[in-house]
Image (cartoon, rainbow, N blue to C red):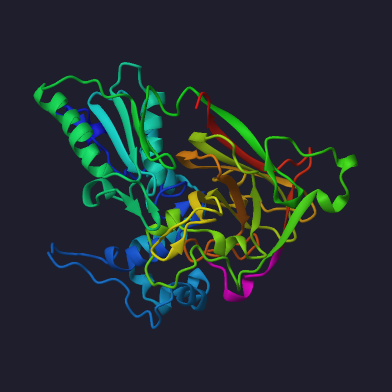
Amino acid sequence: MAVLSNHPAVKAVSPQAPVTDWFIGDDFHHNGAFMLMDAFSFYSGFGKPRPRPTTDGAAGFSDWKTPDNYDFYLRAGALRNYADRFGMKNIPFWNDLMAHPDYDAWWQARNPRPHLKNIMPAVMTVGGLFDAEDCFGAWRVYEAIEKQNSPAASNRLVMGPWVHGGWARTAGDRLGNVVFGKKTTDYYQKEVEFRFFEYYLKNKGTMDLPDAIVFETGSNEWRTYNSWPPKRAEPVKFFFHEGGLLSVAPPPAVDKAPPGMQMDEYLSDPSKPVPYTEDVHLRRTREYMCDDQRFAARRPDVLVYQTEVLDKTMTLAGTVTADLWVNLSSTDADFVVKLIDVFPDTLSGEENGVPLGGYQMLVRGEIMRGRYRNSFEKPQPFVPGTVSQVRFDLPDVSHAFLPGHKLMIQVQSSWFPLADRNPQQFINIYQAKDEDFIPATIQVFHTPVGASGVVLPVLRGR
């Protein structure tokens, strides 16, 4: 809001973990899928009416009756149950969430990105690579300013290996089982943030900060670029193959592959959704953003594709795009795609009691509500027996896959209870009843006609 005011006294602004779009990527929805844990835990307290000024914070929901969030949300059932069962009918914004299932004018009016034009102050957008709440927003604010203003606009991006607000309240040297090897927050505060405001507010020093300062996980080094994504980043499609292979080689011609080798299949059962983490806990964790994914790879309802062992470093810098060709036995389903760094089996040592040999580090994961595959404003059902394309973006990444590692992609149709369950029928999910949730058979094709895979931003020259 300070950026948009263009007040002559505003010289420099740093949006940090900015919320940009509550339906597409920040906080309460990701690609139309409802982020259940965050919405319920946050609005059960923050959403309570405050008719008069107060210094007392309202208590959120606490009657869990279990230490296991998977168990709690599964027993809670359909979203419509929350109104009476947990008192959410008294939360105005919760009612708004339930009343606007699609990307209508109500949601679009809350997206500031189209208005980021004619920017006058210097802007430095800051975000976290592992920001569970608003990873989408920081990348997209920088992008919107870059695309809608003249090259003379002062527009910068800083992304570190941080959780939500981690650049202000953590050392930024590790997250869960992943160690970054340096106090990234200290560097940012002293060498970037302080210098930015000293220059623009006090005319002290020189402004030689690059357009993008982004931490590269894997190699665990700060990288600087003249733009984001870097001009040296080239989109390369990695295709799914029979036997779980992930390769830049396209799949073989249909007439050269037996019918059973043209697709992979799994049963998505809403009564047994895929958990977002293997741990038993109550509150949504921050560490899930880089958790070990071996627990998911072992499930029959998760497809796994991986490269051969890399013989040289492969660096990704930019947006990851999932490109799935699917057939459903029902009229709707969600799709979760996860980008994973598989550590060498021979790697010794452990973190927090977790062996790092064979560790499957989540680099980026994202969910897509299938009905919105063609339009967020006008959802469409799937037609059973018809192959459909589901293409969507994951938030940007900056990661180096080192020699001896492998790159893995996992595909599944639930991510629970991080995101709510899809009843897998083309009905209003916010009004669906418990009995509306049905299993669905999901087929993912890897033929030249339906060549499923992911498009990765591979950095040339490194």
Does 46 sit left or right of 259 as displayed? left
Residue 188 is inside the magenta segment: no
Q: Is residue 327 above or below residue 401?
A: below
* Point 49% across, 61% down: residue: 419
Q: Is residue 434 magenta?
A: yes
Residue 140 in the image, given as x and y percentages of width and height: 41, 36
Q: Is residue 90 visible?
A: yes
At which x and y percent is residue 238? 65, 38
- Segment tinted magenta in the rendering: 431-440
The outermost residue toward the right is 255
Q: Position of residue 159 (x, y in %)?
A: 34, 38
Residue at position x 39%, y 66% from top? Answer: 40
Q: How many marks?
A: 0
**Where 321 falls versus 302 (above or below)?**
above
Residue 60, quarter of picture? bottom left
Residue 440 x, y percent position in the rendering = 70, 64
- 58 to the left or right of 386: left
Residue occupying the point 50% across, 78% down: 75
| Majority secondary structure of magenta residues | loop
